[in-house]
């Protein structure tokens, strides 16, 4: 348990922005840092066959090129958010960007499997410092209301756009150069972002306090164990002993985490953040919604290359319609929020995601790109573009400035865990369906993927129902005044 210490004397006004002479430049630098994380989530995917051949990975071992990154990133997000609160968010973000760039250089120069896996894990550590700090900086530099909505629209688009761009960029670099450049491309971008952070972004106040060591340990081990358990299940099945031990460890650690956080003087994740009904509903939505989206990226990448026989480059470009739709949509969301409020926009977006995954559920062998994939991709881009910004705004509304990093870390942790755990569940469904399917390899792949899309549709439907009944505010709030430290305000 952490040792209680004096509270920070920093003002607790939730919406008071950190002053900056160049808010547009600040936003550009911050979202570019986050774009690196979004791109890296998929840039390696289309390069996996080349990596396997070059470094001699087994089929089972190859999955750890993705999983080593996922474990470090998902396990350390809460800690990364709290580090920013205490050390300073610009300082934390800069350190994360530099670590991300250096580990990308290490991975790009890898000549053996263990070398690459170590580099990917270090990338995950850097990403865990980057992701919550970017969102916290937006919260502290932009007041609640239209300005923050516009900033959040840019931020909210980066994960999906970055993932789509990563597929295209990975295909280009792998086809035209080698898989090494899928990692090395981060080095000059990271160096430029680190310099821009120092030049244009002001540091946030450092809040007096100590790290919640016990909470950090139990939270990190618990979330990492949960991710590891689902990774093992997707690869080995539910009867795997290591998976069962990991589930048990996760349950014990996360239970301990909740008990510690309820008593800690300065917790790594203040449980009062979840006391607000709207924020709790938004957190549930941001946990469930990415499962179907991440599954779509994974299975559609396999289908495009192994069933439609696309090259890595063509497979990457196949996702461009979704990217363009998402990018166009998020630019309109701030206006929709001002006119309609957060809840109607969110429910419309989630409904479209349900329809898109339900459409993919009907995918059959022999369906081409135009008849089977293009429509769902367009609906997915529209639905995701409408959904994530209202969720982010709902979760961050009314958060105290000294807890912005913790709230951002919570949001990012739930989003990443939702995507990772959801994908693991869908891969398990896919494996079970594939083992019982007959026909050509392409037909078996399509049949198993459609079953996984069906489960993804049910998960998206659950997110829609939770948001419909849990989130009560019909309209996003504008700028709010100061309030007492211990009180909660209704979220947007």
Image (tube, helix red, strand yellow):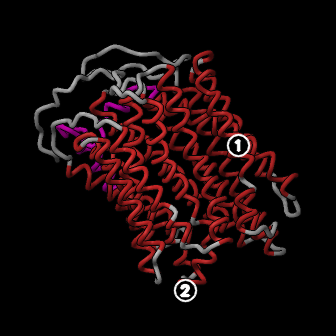
Please state if 112 lies on the left or on the right of 431 as rendered: left
Segment colored magenta = 251-279
Sequence-first tag of 2 and 1: 2
The disc at residue 324 is 1
Q: Quadrant of residue 334?
A: top right
Please state if 128 lies on the left or on the right of 169 as rendered: left
Q: Residue at x 62, y 78 (%)?
A: 50
Where disc 2 sits, the SS reads loop
275 within the magenta span: yes
Q: Quadrant of residue 171?
A: bottom right
Residue 213: percent from left, percent from top: 20, 51
Judge the density around disc 1: few (<14), some (14-19), many (≥20) Cα neighbours within 10 Å: some
Please state if 120 lies on the left or on the right of 433 as rendered: left
Can see residue 200? yes
Q: Residue at x 19, y 47 (%)?
A: 211
157 within the magenta span: no
Residue 247: percent from left, percent from top: 41, 61
Disc 2: which residue:
56
Residue 293: percent from left, percent from top: 63, 49
Q: Residue at x 42, y 30 (%)?
A: 22
Q: Is residue 281 above or below residue 317?
A: above
């Amino acid at each position: 348990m952490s040792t209680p210490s004096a509270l920070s004397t920093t003002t607790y006004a939730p919406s008071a922005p950190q002053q900056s002479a160049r808010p547009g430049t600040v936003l550009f630098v911050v979202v570019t840092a986050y774009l690196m994380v979004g791109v890296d989530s998929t840039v390696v995917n289309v390069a996996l066959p080349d990596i396997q051949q070059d470094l001699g990975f087994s089929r089972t071992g190859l999955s750890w090129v993705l999983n080593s990154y996922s474990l470090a990133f998902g396990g350390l997000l809460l800690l990364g958010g709290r580090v920013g609160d205490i050390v300073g968010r610009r300082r934390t973000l800069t350190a994360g960007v530099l670590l991300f760039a250096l580990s990308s250089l290490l991975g790009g120069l890898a000549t053996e499997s263990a070398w690459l896996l170590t580099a990917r894990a270090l990338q995950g550590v850097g990403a865990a410092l980057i992701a919550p700090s970017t969102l916290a900086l937006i919260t502290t530099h932009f007041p609640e209301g239209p300005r923050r909505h516009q900033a959040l629209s840019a931020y909210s688009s980066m994960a999906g756009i970055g993932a789509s761009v990563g597929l295209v960029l990975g295909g280009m670099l792998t086809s035209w150069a080698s898989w090494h450049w899928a990692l090395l491309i981060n080095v000059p971008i990271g160096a430029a972002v680190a310099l821009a952070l120092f030049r244009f972004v002001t540091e946030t106040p450092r809040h007096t306090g100590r790290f919640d060591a016990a909470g950090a340990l139990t939270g990190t081990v618990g979330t990492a164990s949960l991710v590891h358990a689902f990774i093992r299940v997707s690869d080995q099945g539910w009867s795997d002993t290591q998976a069962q031990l990991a589930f048990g460890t996760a349950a014990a650690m996360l239970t301990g985490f909740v008990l510690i956080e309820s008593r800690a003087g300065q917790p790594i994740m203040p449980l009062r953040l979840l006391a607000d009904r709207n924020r709790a509903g938004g957190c549930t939505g941001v946990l469930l919604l990415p499962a179907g989206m991440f599954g779509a990226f994974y299975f559609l990448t396999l289908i495009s290359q192994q069933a439609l026989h696309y090259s890595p480059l063509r497979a990457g470009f196949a996702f461009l319609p979704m990217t363009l739709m998402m990018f166009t949509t998020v630019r309109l969301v701030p206006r929709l929020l001002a006119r309609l409020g957060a809840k109607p926009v969110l429910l419309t977006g989630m409904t479209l995601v349900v329809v898109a995954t339900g459409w993919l559920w009907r995918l059959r062998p022999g369906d081409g790109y135009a008849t089977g994939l293009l429509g769902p991709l367009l609906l997915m881009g529209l639905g995701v573009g409408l959904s994530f910004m209202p969720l982010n705004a709902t979760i961050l509304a009314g958060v105290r400035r000294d807890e912005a990093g913790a709230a951002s870390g919570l949001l990012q942790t739930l989003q990443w865990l939702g995507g990772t755990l959801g994908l693991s569940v869908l891969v398990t469904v896919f494996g079970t369906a594939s083992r019982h399917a007959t026909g050509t390899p392409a037909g078996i792949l399509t049949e198993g993927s459609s079953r996984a899309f069906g489960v993804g549709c049910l998960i998206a439907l659950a997110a829609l129902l939770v948001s419909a009944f849990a989130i009560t505010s019909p309209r996003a709030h504008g700028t709010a005044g100061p309030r007492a430290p211990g009180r909660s305000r209704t979220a947007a």
